Amino acid sequence: MRTSDASNTVLLIGGTPEGPCRLKLAFLSAAPNVSLRVVQSAKETQAYLSGIDAYADHDGYPMPRLILVDLDVAQRTGLEVLEWVKAKPGLMQIPVIVLTSSGESSDVDQAYALGASSCLLKSMDQEATQDLAKGIEAYATFLAPDMGHTARA
Amino acid sequence: MRLEELWNELLGANRFSLLCAYQIDVFGKEFQVGILDGVLCAHTQLMSAGTNGDLEGAVNDAIEQVLGSRAKELKLLIKANFRPAWAVVPQAEATILWLRNNLPHYADEILARARGSYQAALTSHAN
């Protein structure tokens, strides 16, 4: 078992790994202290959070302080991962924030029922997206250093 | 909660407005998501405990005092948070619920300061 570092790593589930993603750009420009890691599938997320396979290098892939789930591009994956994280000792205390642009009530209600800490409405406006990134960066800063930094199995 | 369900059945069948009152300390530990979720889901609107923005001002000032320069950015995040199943919650109470749920390590200190300045403001208005 190893513990991860105390960096401001935030894991985004559902973003595109490469290419122009509005959220990634917003973090790059407005929240430079966040180290944003992006995964897409449930399997990839579980590998990252378990520190196995391609993510066995714990220095390169530290345990996140915070998990973001983009429901717009990963609704099923996102809710599946949320359920898995909140049922797993050692991971369940990591806050999960759900992002959506639709405000679809049933998805959001389900996300809260599964243990999401917050649900945030995404905006098409770049400035508003940057504000969101700044807010997430500030929130990650205030999380207790030991949160999300438990030993990986 | 059963009583709330019965009232909601009556409301569905008849056109009238119902104002429910719960005695609760908004600065206390009992004012938190786990305890209030059912009540907030059973109502359409929550009326603020404060008047004239006193409560919101006290909470915002306390956040800035405790969290410092990042408070402004954090408030953007708190405002963007939404929960469709809940009643419409005034900003001050929504902020308190968010703090209790998302920053429990800071909530007690922030809300103790907010309580102090809110009570001071009430006393000042009364004099």
Image (cartoon, helix red, strand yellow):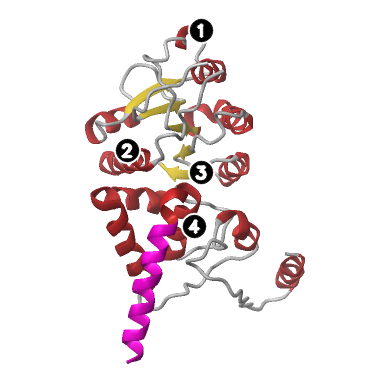
Report, in whole angstroms, how far the alpha carbon at label 3 lies from the one at label 2: 15 Å
Total numbered labels placed on residues in the image:
4
**Rendered image quadrant of residue B58:** bottom left
Front residue (pair B11, A2): A2
What's the magenta region? B108-127
Looking at the image, residue B75 lies above or below residue B54: above
**Disc 4 chain ID:** B
Say above or below: A10 vs A129. above
Q: Earlier in the sequence, mark 3 or mark 2?
A: 3
Q: Secondary structure at mark 3?
A: loop
The answer to whether A41 appears left or right of B11 in the picture is left
Q: Which residue is mark 2?
A: A137
Q: Chain of mark 1?
A: A
On whether residue B84 falls in the magenta region, the answer is no
Image mark for residue A64: none
Q: Position of residue A19 (x, y in %)?
A: 32, 18
Q: Residues within 10 Å of mark 4 (few under 14, many from 20)?
A: many
Kind of residue at disc 2: Glu
Q: Position of residue B69 (x, y in %)?
A: 23, 50
Q: Position of residue A20 (x, y in %)?
A: 30, 22
